[in-house]
Image: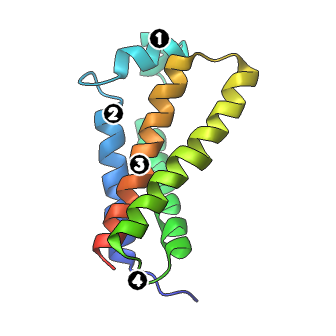
Amino acid sequence: MPEVNWLAVTAAALASFVIGGIWYSPLLFARSWQAAAGLSDEALKGGSPVRIFGGTFLLSFVAAATFAFLLGPRPTLGFAATAGLSAGLCWVTASFGINYLFERRSLRLFLINGGYHTLQFTVIGLVLGVWH
């Protein structure tokens, strides 16, 4: 089994979760994202907060843990941050781009969601690199 710092993984997942909360908050992109995603205020009020936020943290943890396995036990800070930036921009955001082209989604939604995931993985890499 590969060596993984589970405290670092948990911190990276938590950082990802917090950044998402800020990114999609009224301070930054909440209204633009809501309009681009075609979600009404009523639609956003629906759903289980436990399911939504609990699921979000769990998926952030899975992403951070998998990224920790990919980076290896003691990545340098520079490598981990660059790998995070590359994963967010070139894997996640590029994959969104493919879907969004076929789904005819807006460039605005692509930039908001892709920007978050690029930042998310960069921060995950930074946290894992700092705690090598």
Q: Is 36 left or right of 126, judged from the image as shown?
A: right
20, above or below 126, in the image: above
**10 Å neighbourhood of mark 1: few (<14), some, or many (≥20)?**
some
Q: Which mark is residue 120?
A: 3
The colour scheme of the drawn protein is rainbow
Q: Amino acid type of disc 3?
A: Gln
Q: Sequence order check: which comes first, mark 4 or mark 1?
A: 1
Q: Are marks 1 and 2 in contact (CB under 8 Å)?
A: no
Q: Which mark is residue 23?
A: 2
Question: In what element is the residue under mark 1?
Answer: helix
Q: Are marks 4 and 1 in contact (CB under 8 Å)?
A: no
Q: Amino acid type of disc 2?
A: Trp
Q: Position of residue 77 (x, y in %)?
A: 33, 70
> Disc 4 and disc 1: Cα gap in Å?
42 Å
Q: Is residue 48 visible?
A: no
Q: Amino acid type of disc 1?
A: Ala
Q: Sequence order check: which comes first, mark 1 or mark 2?
A: 2
Q: Sequence order check: which comes first, mark 4 or mark 3?
A: 4
> Disc 4 and disc 3: Cα gap in Å?
20 Å
Which residue matches tag 4?
74
**Residue at the limit of the structure toward the right, as seen here:** 102
